[in-house]
Amino acid sequence: MHRIVFASQNPGKIRELQALTADQDIEIIGLNDLGRAFAEPIEDGETFLENATIKAVQYAKETGLHCLADDSGLIVDALDGRPGVISSHFAFDGNTEGEAAGLSRQERDDRNNARLMHDLEGVADADRTARFTCTMVLASPDGQVLAHTQGDFEGRIGQPGDVPRGDHGFGYDPLFLVAPDYTRASAELAPEEKNSMSHRAKAVGAMMQKLASVFNDS
């Protein structure tokens, strides 16, 4: 079984990836499973691919393991693509220091969601189209990039009073109404259903095909 570290300390993301790869000859572990602290890389890329590559390469070298890293976020058409690469710190304009650093993940999610709904105030349903996007990068222990993939999950942001709703997921999931019928929020999907259609599921599915080639050739 091939052991791959997933460059994340987000337990929600790690559980999703472990579920998505459960039928593969792969063991996914998180950084916390390695029993030591790692310095977080500076994600100063302007694209999801650049940031995922920064993480995959640094953590692969530090852990001595093959490393999968993703960079994902929410793209809202009416906001010219924002939050984009600063999705996790949208409420703080991408600043990870200061006030943002002292908040729990849930507190930060709440602030991000409030900022998003504020910025979309008065925007009609038809113009609230959005998508989650995920770019995934695999790096070898020596820091060589071996593969990258991308997946998108289409929907739109609901109106105040209709969202937030749902008890599953994290981040913007309670605000995101899933295309094409927009009747359910992403946070209302059972984990198994979400894992069959999400942006991360699509990126992981494409990556699994590439992993087979990478390890068969190694």
Image (tube, rainbow, N blue to C red):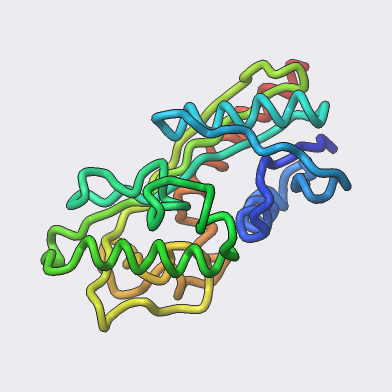
Location of residue 38 (image quadrant): top right
Q: Nearer the viewer, residue 64 or 46?
A: 46
Q: What residue is at 47 percent from the left and 52 percent from the top?
A: 88
Image coordinates of residue 167 in percent, x first then y, are: 51, 78
In the rendered image, the vertical position of residue 27 relative to residue 194, given as above or below: above
Location of residue 210 (image quadrant): top right
Q: Nearer the viewer, residue 98 or 150?
A: 98
Location of residue 212 (image quadrant): top right
Q: Nearer the viewer, residue 112 or 60?
A: 112
Q: Is residue 205 left or right of residue 154?
A: right
Q: Is residue 183 left or right of residue 100?
A: left
Image coordinates of residue 46 in percent, x first then y, are: 40, 29
Image coordinates of residue 115 in percent, x first then y, are: 32, 63
For the view shown, which residue lies furthest in the right direction? 35
Q: How many circles with numbers are drawn on the protein?
A: 0
Q: Is residue 189 left or right of residue 131?
A: right
Q: Nearer the viewer, residue 211 or 41?
A: 41
Quadrant of the image containing the N terminus: top right
Q: What residue is at 73 percent from the left and 28 percent from the top?
A: 60
Q: Is residue 38 left or right of residue 89?
A: right
Quadrant of the image containing the C terminus: top right
Q: What residue is at 45 percent from the left and 36 percent from the top?
A: 150
Image coordinates of residue 169 in percent, x first then y, are: 52, 67
